[in-house]
Image: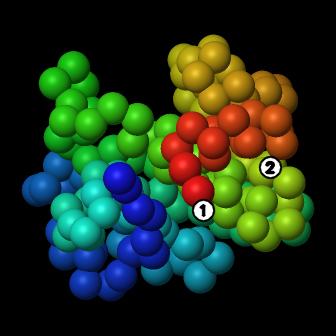
């Protein structure tokens, strides 16, 4: 079982390039309009499996950034589904905030087809991807049992 929690300031000392993180999470954490969440295994919140940065807009949740821990990337990853779990969390948050599950994000060009297939995201031109109510419902059901 996993849980998604708000990242705390004390967590930042673990999220460094030296520890295999690729993005500048201190910058995300410091941005007033962003919320940073960590994915952990239930009852083990000190080992971060993945991170996401979101912004709550007027009618949807925008996923700014998502990253799996270094040990959850590549062929020999420890856990599958870290990114999917974090996207599903953003969808659940969107439902909770009254946005019908809508989540938007920018995709790297080479991943657009992958996101259409795995997340049922809709490509809205350029690199904008949108997860609608139906796709969000499926993701939430897949990753959150309650």
Quadrant of residue 98 in the image? Answer: bottom right
Q: Residue at x 55, y 50 (%)?
A: 144
What residue does disc 2 label?
A: 102
75 is higher (above) or lower (below) than 21: above
What residue does disc 1 label?
A: 54
Q: Residue at x 75, y 67 (%)?
A: 96
How far apart, in angstroms, are the residues tagged by discs 2 and 1?
13 Å
The C terminus: image quadrant: bottom right
Q: Residue furthest left?
A: 18
Q: Is residue 15 left or right of residue 114?
A: left
7 is higher (above) or lower (below) than 76: below
* Image coordinates for residue 23, horizontal then vertical, percent: 35, 53
Residue 89's label in the rendered image is: none
Return the residue nearer the eye: 26 or 114. 114
Badge 2 or badge 1: first in the primary sequence: 1
Q: Residue at x 74, y 49 (%)?
A: 103
> Is there any visible trace of residue 28 in the rendered image?
no
* Image coordinates for residue 47, horizontal then vertical, percent: 19, 62
């Amino acid at each position: 079982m996993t849980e998604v929690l708000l990242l705390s300031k004390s967590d930042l000392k673990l999220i460094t390039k030296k520890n295999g993180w690729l993005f500048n999470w201190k910058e995300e954490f410091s941005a007033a309009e962003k919320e940073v969440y960590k994915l952990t295994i239930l009852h083990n919140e000190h080992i971060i499996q993945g991170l996401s940065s979101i912004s709550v807009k007027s009618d949807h949740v925008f996923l700014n950034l998502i990253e799996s821990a270094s040990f959850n990337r590549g062929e020999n990853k420890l856990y599958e589904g870290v990114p999917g779990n974090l996207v599903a969390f953003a969808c659940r948050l969107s439902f909770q905030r009254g946005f019908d599950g809508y989540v938007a994000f920018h995709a790297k060009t080479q991943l657009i087809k992958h996101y259409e297939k795995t997340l049922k995201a809709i490509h809205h031109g350029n690199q904008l991807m949108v997860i609608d109510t139906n796709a969000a419902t499926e993701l939430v059901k897949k990753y959150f049992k309650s």
